[in-house]
Image (tube, grey):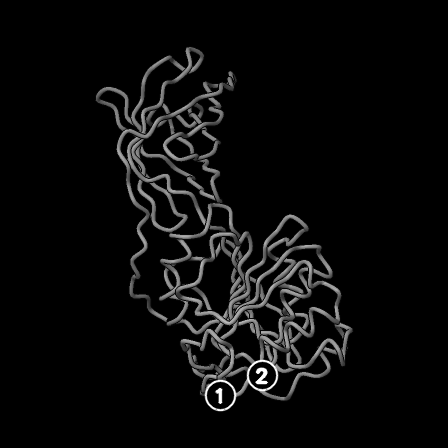
Amino acid sequence: MNSNSHGRIGMGLLMAGSLAVVPSARSWAETAPVAEPAPARVAQANPAETARPKLDVPYVPTPMNVVEEMLRLTNVNKNDMVYDLGCGDGRIVVTAAKEHGARGLGVDIDPERIRESRENAKEAGVTDKVQFLQKDLFTMDIRPATVMTMYLLPSVNLKLRPKLFRDLRPGTRIVSHDFDMGSWQPDKETQVSGPFRQHNLYYWVIPANAAGEWTLQLPKSAGGQKRTLRLRQRFQQVSGTMSAGDRTLPIRDAKMTGDRLTFTVADDAGNPNTSMTFEGRVNGSTLKGNLVSRKGSAITKSAVTARRTRAGAIELSEESRSR
């Protein structure tokens, strides 16, 4: 499918229609026109919300079951702040508030959509939980978000990606409708059947930065040595080594989910029955968690803390990929 044949530029493209007219989820789905979503231009909006910016294509809907799956995939709950950039008539944010008890912020470049979103929020009785603003998604403050919904063209996703890593807290959940994030592989991927086609959903969790050099003091039960952990990180993918003296061993099975890091080190080369597995959390320059040491049938578990002695950066550059 052509990249320029899909939805409106903005996070969380929603269905056309008004809650004031069709308040039920089923009715929303039934109002979908027989058309594929098509992109609108990313534009600077008039802050006064008086002039309607010129859009390249008309606003069109996304099936309600896709919206519901986006909220299910991100596990939206009453403690969340859901940001929907390019909110259309506000249905992702309104549904998150009405059905899941979340707070939300919807943003769109079109003042008509903002007025419609506010009317729909009022009709749904969630004006105390949601807000709708005419803003530019590239310059607005997204730091309060705990959940981000997206329906953007691939080029816009790539342009926005550094901002997501820079501004969102580790653990923030993101779901993108139809388009991925280039080389940033999703943590989960699923498909939803719509009235006219299959819809792809991509899910990520913003990772903490574990890159750099760490000093780890092993407990006596695990040998009592001081070890150096050198980690590289590309998006949420982590690799590296652990060194003690003149011995350097690679870490394996590394996984970063939000601020949670797990990895295993084979402590004795060639001996699969001797290993150490770490599971813990990154908090700034501290890595704290539990180390499970296995030597044959003997298993010991100890609390450990590592300190970052040399900072590193998450690699975010795009790689060319064959399609």
Position of 72 with respect to 277 (left or right) is right
Q: Quadrant of residue 132?
A: bottom right
User: Residue flagged by tag 2: what amino acid is it?
Assistant: Val
95, above or below 81, in the image: below
Q: SS class of the residue under badge 1?
A: loop
For image coordinates 63% across by 60% down, the residue present is 71
Q: Quadrant of residue 264?
A: top left
User: Residue flagged by tag 1: what amino acid is it?
Assistant: Val
Position of 230 with respect to 166 (left or right) is left
Image disc number at residue 235: none
Image disc number at residue 60: 2
Q: Nearer the viewer, residue 315 or 187?
A: 315
Tag 2: Cα neighbours inside 10 Å, few (<14), some, or many (≥20)? many
Q: Which quarter of the image is occupied by the C terminus? A: bottom left
118, above or below 185, in the image: below
**Mark 1 — residue?**
57
Q: Where residue 120 sits in the image (x, y, percent)?
A: 69, 73
Q: Nearer the viewer, residue 117 or 41?
A: 117
Position of 92 with respect to 175 (left or right) is right
Furthest-top residue in this view: 220
For image coordinates 48% across by 38% down, the residue present is 260
102, above or below 107, in the image: above
Q: SS class of the residue under badge 2?
A: loop
Marks 2,1: beta carbons within 8 A: yes
For image coordinates 32% across by 55% down, the residue present is 316
Q: Where residue 198 sits in the image (x, y, percent)?
A: 59, 75
The residues bearing labels 2 and 1 have C-alpha atoms spaced at a distance of 9 Å
